[in-house]
Amino acid sequence: MSSIPSAATGTPAVASRRWWTLTTVALAQLMVVLDSTVVNIALPSAQTDLGFSNGDRQWIVTSYSLAFGSLLLLGGRLSDLIGRKRTFIIGLIGFALASALGGAAGSFGMLVFARALQGAFGALLAPTALAVLTTTFTIPKERARAFGVFGAIAGAGGAIGLLLGGVLTENFNWRWNLYINVVIAIIAVIGAVLFVTTVPRQGPRPKLDVPGTILVSAALFSLVYGFSNAETEGWSSALTWGFLAGAGILLVAFVLWQRRATHALLPLSVILDRNRGAAYLSVMIAGAGMFGIFLFVTYYLQTSLNYTPIQTGVSFLPMIGMLILAAQLSTNIFVPRFGPKIMVPFGMVLGALGMLYLTRLGLDSTYAGDVLPALMVLGFGMGSIMPASIQTATLGIDRGHAGVASAMVNTSQQVGGSIGTALLNTLAASAATSYVASHLPATAQTAAEAAVHSYSTAYFWGAGFFAIGAVLAVSLFRTRADTRARAEAAAAAADKADQTDKSEGSAPTSLAPEPVVAH
């Protein structure tokens, strides 16, 4: 007996196509997210092979971060202008070619250029992937499941990169940490051609805000470079403060321009929405706190417990498992019932507790008794924060602004990671120096204890990031009653606009929030 599909769900074939679209988008997101950590594992081998100095080594990471961070909003806006499917495929092909160029690099300069090219195409790909998801899944239950998967990958991709990087470096060579992207991209391109739909444009083609693009790209470049420079040159460097001050001035100029621009790159209404702004802040703070987990736990496992890269990657698997579990429970059960005002602070508190637990680690600690419990708590915390925040950040956004709204998610995570890198590394280095100075004469044992002490300092401040995030999330996210009332009003307005459009012979162009979802 055949059933007649509803207008909301569409035919089974259409529903199946949506889930294949999710698989394609998830592959692209995984490729971008794991790239940062998978390359970090390969750096020592690449340095030996190509013969560059320790001072130059940072540029392998920084060149990617600068291009990625500064071009994200432009990448998101381009997906709004030239179409999601086209932008998505261009991003995949460009990222794959840049990865192949980096894998084949015969010199340090070529590798840095390839990494910058990766960052540029990553800035095109990452926001477009999220925008495709946002415009594909509009049914509440399906949207919850889709964003649960996407949020889990956003949070766990770094840990997966550690494992994959260890396996590829130990069993092949460092170049395969870049070549692997080509394999993933080929599969994703085939999926995009077959399953990602082309949405017909409604109304005239919007124009690119060139002055706004220049201002915000320069501001984000200065911000990322300033924090990267602080990591290597310290906070006393005039260059550090010069770039950070320049970033502040450019951001102010960008906001002032957006208030009067006819075709604004980032309409201020996108970020001034209370729930959406809270979601962006939560993603940024979680990104800053997460840095301490991956970097310093990796250092501890490899230098203090003498784990191999593969063993280190495997050690993060329980955390990934808890993150995936929490992401599915959060988006399918807890967020619809309690809303982000409860779930995001809950995740932040778990993050703070997990980081505080890590401060207990010493040279005689064990993985099972001391590291594993903290990683599992942190995994559940991140699984509660990221999917709820990402889903809220893109909920109810106008279809024409889905790309730039998605880019703000990636930008928030990137800026948070840059801040976390600079601050936690600086605090850890200062703590190690102070420890050695107060435990003279310095010995190998003293150096080992100083390293563990520096990690504990980073964990403590990382816990502080999460604690601040919990307070901000509680304060800024709307209550369920307020959210429901606004959603019902928006749905009523959308219905009214839909009736008007039908009477005029045109189709609606916005993605109004569904009143059944309590955010």
Image (spheres, rainbow, N blue to C red):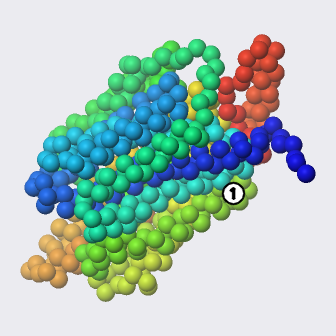
Identify which residue, 173 or 71, lies in the foreground: 173
For residue 186, above or below residue 165: above
- Mark 1 = which residue? 332
Q: Amino acid at mark 1?
A: Asn
The residue drawn where x is 18% and y is 40% is 239
For residue 220, above or below residue 253: below
Query: Going by the image, does 366 lie left or right of 516?
Result: left
The image shows residue 499 at horizontal and vertical percentages of 81, 21
Asked where in the image residue 117 lies, by quadrant, the reply is: top left
The image shows residue 449 at horizontal and vertical percentages of 23, 79
The residue drawn where x is 41% and y is 63% is 159
The residue drawn where x is 37% and y is 50% is 181
Helix, strand or loop at label 1? It is: helix
The residue drawn where x is 37% and y is 29% is 216
Label 1 CA crowd tier, 10 Å (few <14, some 14–19, many 20+) = many
Query: Going by the image, does 85 lie left or right of 18?
Result: left
Q: Is residue 232 visible?
A: yes
Identify which residue, 429 or 335, lies in the foreground: 335
The image shows residue 411 at horizontal and vertical percentages of 43, 41
